[in-house]
Image (spheres, grey):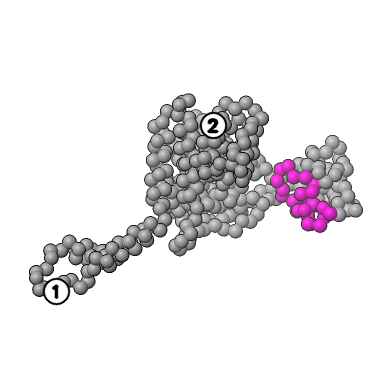
């Protein structure tokens, strides 16, 4: 089509032929106008990914150079809302064209951990050490080019660990295989961020920025804000606590930028405009994250102590197998898993085959885990363990279980 367009342009601006000469039969003004219109329409229908990236870059630059004060806070809130909207559009799958190749694997086991980090930080070595899974490890970058799953067997639980390809700067915009890596990370129960202890902390900041850009909120809880879109009545704003970081005008400004003019908003805690934007967007994922600093055998003791004292951080050496047992303990604690053992009448507890459940589950959840019809036949249960005042204690179906409790269910 480019060659045809060049021929049309050359024919259109060519020197007129002499009198009596034959005109160029391949050129027609009407055909040229129709061709230009058709090409312009096709270009307008193509995905404007580059346009969205340019808008995101412009908004980020304007936010960075705008000083935050009373006069600019509403302008900044509007910019942040537009930024969140454009980032959501960037993550939406394309409706046309061929589907991209992904490497998501079937979720299995009692929990899933996504292993994320820059290239050549020791992710494959950690996977091979913890799961006995063969993953190619080398001293050059981009050794792993696809998702390699492994299973950690710990305290009777099967924890799926995914070794994902290394993330590079700009992964949220699709550089490398960043978008596929982040898409798999959104399905995990915990993010294990692998960092090189010999390199500056800028790697951690870059990874946090890339994950934040795609809606992953690390080590944060969902804001306690009630939000519901209505069909009419305007925006109803209420709060049950003093508001110091956001107000009604800011809420209306953000909602209008999302083209929402009728909604009910209730703040149950003092939240920022960024947290309210997350609630309105509705596609944020809140995950626990453990920062693992590898290669501590190559730095000083003082630097190891400084890294170990940071929140949610663990220092290890995969090559020398240092501190890996403590890493497993931290993973178990942040996954909030518990073990519940069952007991039949007149028989000892079955400590070989326990139930792996989430912390805070009730007796009803235990019944559903044993058999889907057991809760309907439930009469009472006898529980031995730390969740009772004495052992055994007769409890109801709403009793909250704790780690290593033993339960015996009595049917009607």
Tell me, yes or no, whether the two marked residues, 2 and 1, touch with CB atoms within 8 Å.
Answer: no
* Depicted 222 relative to depicted 158: above or below: above
**Which segment did they paint magenta?**
349-376
How far is the residue under mark 2 from the one under mark 1?
A: 72 Å
Which residue is rendered at x = 64% and y = 35% of the image?
266
Whether 101 is drawn above or below 341: the answer is: below
N-term mark: 2 or 1:
1
Instruction: Look at the image and say whether residue 350 sits in the magenta stretch.
Output: yes
Residue 155 image point, x, y percent: 69, 47
Q: Residue at x 83, y 51 (%)?
A: 343
Q: Position of residue 102 (x, y in %)?
A: 50, 58
Q: Is residue 400 left or right of residue 180?
A: right
Q: Identify the residue under disc 1.
A: 22
Q: Position of residue 223 (x, y in %)?
A: 61, 37
Mark 2: secondary structure? helix
Q: Is residue 113 magenta?
A: no
- The answer to whether one can see residue 288 in this image is no
The kind of secondary structure element at disc 1 is loop
Q: Is residue 52 left or right of residue 403?
A: left
Q: Which residue is mark 2?
A: 249
């Amino acid at each position: 089509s480019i060659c045809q367009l060049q021929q049309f342009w050359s024919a259109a601006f060519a020197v007129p032929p002499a009198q009596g000469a034959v005109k160029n039969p391949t050129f027609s003004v009407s055909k040229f106008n129709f061709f230009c219109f058709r090409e312009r329409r096709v270009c307008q229908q193509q995905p404007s990914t580059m346009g969205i990236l340019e808008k995101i870059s412009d908004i980020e630059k304007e936010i960075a150079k705008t000083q935050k004060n009373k006069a600019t806070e509403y302008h900044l809130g509007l910019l942040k809302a537009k930024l969140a909207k454009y980032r959501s559009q960037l993550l939406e799958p394309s409706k046309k064209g061929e589907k991209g190749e992904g490497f998501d694997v079937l979720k299995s086991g009692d929990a899933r951990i996504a292993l994320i980090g820059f290239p050549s930080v020791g992710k494959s070595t950690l996977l091979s050490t913890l799961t006995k899974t063969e993953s190619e490890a080398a001293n050059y970058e981009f050794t792993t080019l696809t998702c390699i799953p492994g299973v950690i067997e710990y305290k009777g639980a099967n924890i799926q660990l995914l070794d994902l390809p290394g993330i590079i700067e700009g992964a949220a915009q699709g550089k490398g295989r960043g978008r596929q890596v982040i898409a798999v990370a959104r399905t995990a129960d915990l993010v294990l961020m692998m960092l090189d202890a010999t390199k500056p902390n800028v790697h951690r900041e870059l990874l946090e920025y890339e994950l934040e850009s795609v809606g992953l909120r690390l080590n944060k809880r969902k804001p306690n804000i009630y939000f519901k879109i209505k069909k009419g009545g305007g925006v109803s704003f209420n709060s049950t606590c003093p508001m110091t970081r956001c107000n009604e005008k800011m809420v209306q400004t953000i909602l209008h930028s999302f083209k929402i003019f009728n909604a009910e908003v209730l703040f149950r805690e003092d939240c920022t405009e960024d947290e309210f934007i997350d609630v309105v967007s509705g596609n944020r994922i809140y995950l626990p994250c453990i920062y693992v600093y590898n290669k501590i055998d190559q730095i000083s003791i003082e630097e190891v102590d400084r890294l170990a004292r940071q929140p949610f951080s663990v220092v290890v050496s995969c090559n020398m197998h240092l501190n890996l047992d403590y890493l497993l303990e931290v993973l178990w604690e942040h996954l909030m898993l518990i073990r519940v053992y069952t007991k039949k009448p007149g028989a000892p507890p079955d400590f070989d085959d326990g139930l792996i459940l989430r912390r805070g589950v009730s007796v009803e959840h235990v019944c559903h885990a044993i058999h889907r019809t057991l809760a309907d036949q439930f009469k009472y249960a006898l529980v031995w363990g730390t969740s009772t005042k004495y052992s055994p204690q007769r409890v109801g179906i709403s009793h909250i279980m704790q780690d290593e409790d033993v339960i015996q269910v009595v049917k009607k």
